[in-house]
Amino acid sequence: MEWIEVVMPIIKSIFLAIIVLIVGSTIIKFLIKVLEKQIQRSKLDNSLKPFIMSLISAILKILLALSVISILGVDITSFVAILAAAGFAVGLAFQGSLSNFAGGILLLTLRPFKIGDFIEGAGYSGTVKGIQILYTELVTPDNKSVYIPNGDLSNAGIVNYSKNSTRRVDLTFGVGYEADNNHVIKTLKDIVDNHPSVLDEPEPFIRLTGHGDSAVEYTVRIWVKSEDYWGVYFDILEQAKIRFDEENISIPYPQMDIHLNK
């Protein structure tokens, strides 16, 4: 019968498409498991691994879908053209999201920072908690979660305070003009030398660096491990006040402008 001759090829195509879909899905799942194990064992950054797996999975599924559509007799060229047109329309509607997606790829590829680093960028600073495809999550020092679009972060200057193992602490102290220069430097040097977290190399810098209106300015520059930065910063400030009082080194009060009502 003529209708059987017409229907049979269609049934065969549908049956074959179902088989390819089932077998293809099984193979993709197997490949994903194998690749996931290999990627997990690799030395790639932990924030990059989920992105790579999701990208590979999406590509394999798209290829499988195109194969099934081709078996069903649909013109792939026309179908791809429709997808391209739809993708272009969606792209125009979600330009910001696409920018963030591209920014996420840049951040995950170039890796200017990693999870756990303390960074400053796009007007915010904090510890990196997660690097997602569209945004990066920071936790501020006062425990607030900030979600920065990757597009903004990738296009802005990024300061990574955790990148290097050491940092320099810069401090300036104002001392009265009547204080003896050698006495002040010796006192500051003693404070620095007795702090266990201050590194010997590079050598600490302690010099008179300025003459203000009511005070002589002394600059202290010392190197510490990055994780010790704030502890040393506040320790030296506190110790300087205590030692200056003990050594009778005067710290002038800041001058204040007083406006009298006439």
Image (cartoon, rainbow, N blue to C red):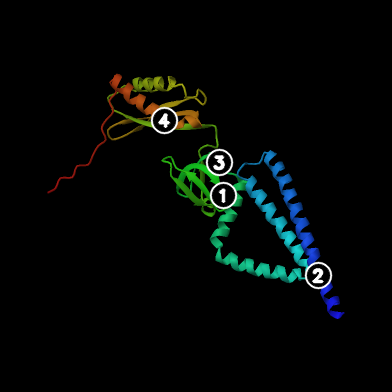
Asked which secondary structure carries label 4, the reply is helix
Camera-side mark, 2 or 3: 2
- Disc 2 crowd rating (10 Å Cα; few below 14, some 14-19, many 20+) is few
| C-beta proximity under 8 Å, tags 1 and 4 | no
Instruction: Determine the CA span between mark 4 and mark 3.
Output: 25 Å
Instruction: Determine the CA span between mark 2 and mark 3.
Output: 53 Å
Q: Which residue is mark 2?
A: 11
Reading the chain from its start, which is encountered first: label 1 or label 3?
3
> Along the horizontal axis of the image, is 215 left or right of 188?
left
| C-beta proximity under 8 Å, tags 2 and 4 | no
User: Residue drawn at (75%, 48%), measured in percent from left and top?
Assistant: 30
Camera-side mark, 2 or 4: 2
* Residue 192 location, quadrant: top left
| C-beta proximity under 8 Å, tags 4 and 3 | no
Q: Which residue is mark 4?
A: 233
Q: Which residue is mark 3?
A: 115
Camera-side mark, 4 or 3: 3
Reading the chain from its start, which is encountered first: label 1 or label 4?
1
Reading the chain from its start, which is encountered first: label 2 or label 3?
2
Residue type at the position of mark 2 = Ile
Reading the chain from its start, which is encountered first: label 2 or label 1?
2
Q: Which residue is mark 1?
A: 132
User: Residue drawn at (22%, 42%), measured in percent from left and top?
Assistant: 257
Asked which secondary structure carries label 1, the reply is loop
Q: Position of residue 251 (x, y in %)?
A: 28, 28
> Along the horizontal axis of the image, is 224 left or right of 104?
left
